[in-house]
Image: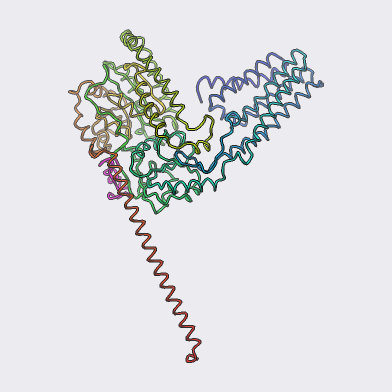
Amino acid sequence: MGSGSELVAAVLLGLGYPCALLAALIPSFWGFVAAVVVTYATDWYLHRRGSYLVNRLNKIKFALPMRFLVRQLLLVLLLARLNMAEQTLFYLAVGGFLFLFGLQAPHGALATLIKLRRTMPVVTRNVDLHGLKIPDAPPQALLRRSAEKLLHLDIPAVAGVLIAVRTHQNVVAYVGIGLAAGLAVLYTGALFRYIRRNQRVPTAPQVLKGVDQWLREYRPTVAMYFSGSKESAYQVKMWVETLEQLEARPLIILRERYIVPQLEATSVPVICVPGGVHLMNMDLSTVRVTLYPANVGKNIHMLRVPTMKHVFIGHGDSDKVASVNPFSKVYDEVWTAGRAGRDRYALADVGVRDEDIVEVGRPQLAPIASWTGAPKNPIPTILYAPTWEGWDDNPGNTSLLLAGENIVKRLLDADQPVRLIYKPHPFTGTRSARAKAVHTRIMALVEKAAAERAAEPRWAQEAAAAQADQAAAQATLARAEARLAELSKPGRPGGDESETSRVSLADPQRLEEIKRLRAEWNEAYWRSFGWWQHRTVTGTEPRLYDCFNEADGMVSDISSVVSDFIASGKPYAVTDSAEVGAEFRRQNTAVRAAVILSNSAEELGELLAAVADPAADTLAEARRELKRYLLGPDEPTSIEQFNAAVTALAARSEARNAGAGQQLLELDGELDDAGEDAVGDSETAVTGLDSPVAG
C-alpha cells in the first residue's frame, strides 16, 4: 500500500473531492479553495513518489485527467452557485477548461508518436551503431510526465478564476485563462519539431541491418542469453565480470529493455532484443556457445539454433529443487560448481546425463575473502541473509516466516554483544504479504536495537572516537556516488535509450575509474558507521559478497547464498524451517558443515561460540571438505576451469558444424548424381521411342 505518508496523502486526496463538492454546493469560497489546494498537493506528492496508490486510482477509472476534469467542473459549479452563471466570466471559464481538456488529445498523440518513433527494435551497449545516424533525443522536460505537465497548466486558469471571484476583478481570470491556454498551445507546438523526418530514429529494418553488420565485424563466439523480471536482473549481473575475463569474444543477449539499465558498466557488448522474430533473424552464425543463467520460456528462441552449443550455468548452486529442474535436459551441457552439483542431478534423475555435466567452479566467488580464524573487529559480526518466500507456501523456502524474528531477537540480545547485518533476498515480500510484514518488523527491530546501542555509554565512547573517520568516510561516499552517477550513463544527461545505444561504446579508462570508485565506495561504506552498529542492507550496494567479507559468521536458508558463503570458510548456520529433523542434514548437501537451527533459533549459541573461539569451532574441517565438494578445487582457479570449458565446447561446436556442412555437401553431390542419372535414363527412353528400330 506504500508508505504511511503516501496512505495519508491518498486519504486526503480522496476526501478533497467530496469536500470541494460540498463547498461548491453550500457555497463556501474558502472551503472550496482549501479542498482544491489539498487535491493539487496530494496528487503531486503521490506522483512524485511513484505511489502504488496512484495506479489503484487508475484502475477504478479515476485517473489523473479525470481528477483534473472533476476539479474544473466543481469550479464551474461553484460559479453557478455564486449566481455567476450569466456572467462572461462563467462562459469564459467553461470555454477555457474545455479548450484545455480538448488539447489533451493532440498533445498526447504527439508525445506518444514521438516515443514510438524513438523506440528502436533493439537496445545496445558497446555496439558501434554510428552508421545509423540516430538523432539526439528530445529534451527530457518535453516528454517526461508530459500528460501530467499539460494538465497542471490549468493552475493559472483555476487560480485566476478564484481570485476574480473574490476580488471581482475579472481581468485576473482573463489573464489566467489566457496564460494557461497559451502555455498549453506552446507546449503542444514544441512537440511538432520532433516528429519531422530528421528527428526520427532509423526504421526497424535499418537498425537490424546495422546490428547484423556489426555482428559480422565483431564475430562473437560466446553469448550469454537472459530473460527475466526486473527483480531477477541479479541472475545475469553476477556473470558479467566472468564474461569479461574470457579469452573468447563474448556477447550478452537480453530480452527485456528494463534489464539493460540495471547492468553495471562493462566492456562486454550487450544487445537487448525484445522481439522473438527479430532475434531469430539476427546473424549469430559465429556464436559457438550460448550460456543460460535461468530456465525461462523465452530460451526457446535461442535453443532452436543448431549451430551453437547450449549450456545451463544457472545463477547459484543450492539444494533447492530449482537446481535440478527437469528442463535442464534440453541443454547440450549443464555446468555445475563442483561434484555436489553432479551428484544432485544423479539423485534427482530428471534426465540430465552424467556425461553432459561439467564442473567449472564458481568464478564469481573470487572476491570472497578467506576466514582468518578470528573476528575482524572487537565484537563478531553475524550476517542474516534469508532467502525469499518462493512461489508456494512451503515452510522450508525461507526462515523469515517462522524463525526470522527469533533469529534476529536472539542475535540482538546475545549474552556477548554481536553486530547484526540483515540483508534479505531482493524478492522478499514480492509474493507473500506475510513475508513482507515480517521483513518490515525485522527492519524495525534492527533499527530500534541500533538506536539503543548508540545510547549506551560504551558505544557512545566508540562513536566519539570514530567520529572523524566516519565523517571522512561519509565524504568519500558522497564524492564517489556523485562521480559514479556521472559515469553510470554514457552520453549527455536526458538521452533516451536510442541515443544511449548510439554513444555507449566501451571506454577502458571510464570502466577502470568506475571499478576503482566502486571499490573506494565499498570500503568507505563500512567505515561510515561503527563496527558495533547493527545494519539493514537492501538494494544492490553493498553487494552480498561484500557483506560476506564484513561478516564473521552467517545465518541463512537452503539457497545458493549458503554455498557461496562456504567459499569463505567461516562458520554458518542454516534454519530447518520445515522441521525436517535428522534428515535435514542428509537431504541438503550445503548444511553438512552447518549449525542447524530450529525455528526457535535456540541453537545460535553454537554458531556464536565457533565465531568467537576457534577452539569451539568443531566444524572447521567439515567446512573445508564441503567447500571442495560443493565448489571444486582451488587449483586450477574457477575462471581457468570456466574458460577451459568454454574453449572445449566451442571446439566441439565448430567440429559439429564442419561435419554437418560436409554431410550437406555429400548429400548435395548424391542428389546431383541422382539427377544426372535420371536425366540420362530419360534421354535413353526418348531416344528409344524415336528410334526406327523401336517403331
Horizontal and vertical percent position of residue 395: 36, 32
Query: Percent x, y for residue 473?
Result: 37, 18
Per the rendered image, the range of residues in magenta is 336-360
Residue 106 figure quarter: top right
Residue 451, image x, y percentages: 38, 13
Please state the total of marks drawn on the protein image.
0
Left or right: residue 235 compared with residue 575: right
**Which residue is at 53% across, 43% downward?**
132
Determine whether 206 is above or below 64 in the image. below
Who's the residue at 36% across and 24% down the image? 520
Residue at 50% x, 36% y: name it: 500
Question: Eyeballing the image, is 220 above or below 603?
Answer: below
Picture quarter containing residue 622?
top left
* Nearer the observer, 217 or 591: 217
In the depicted structure, whether residue 98 falls above or below residue 37: below
Q: Residue 596: say if magenta.
A: no
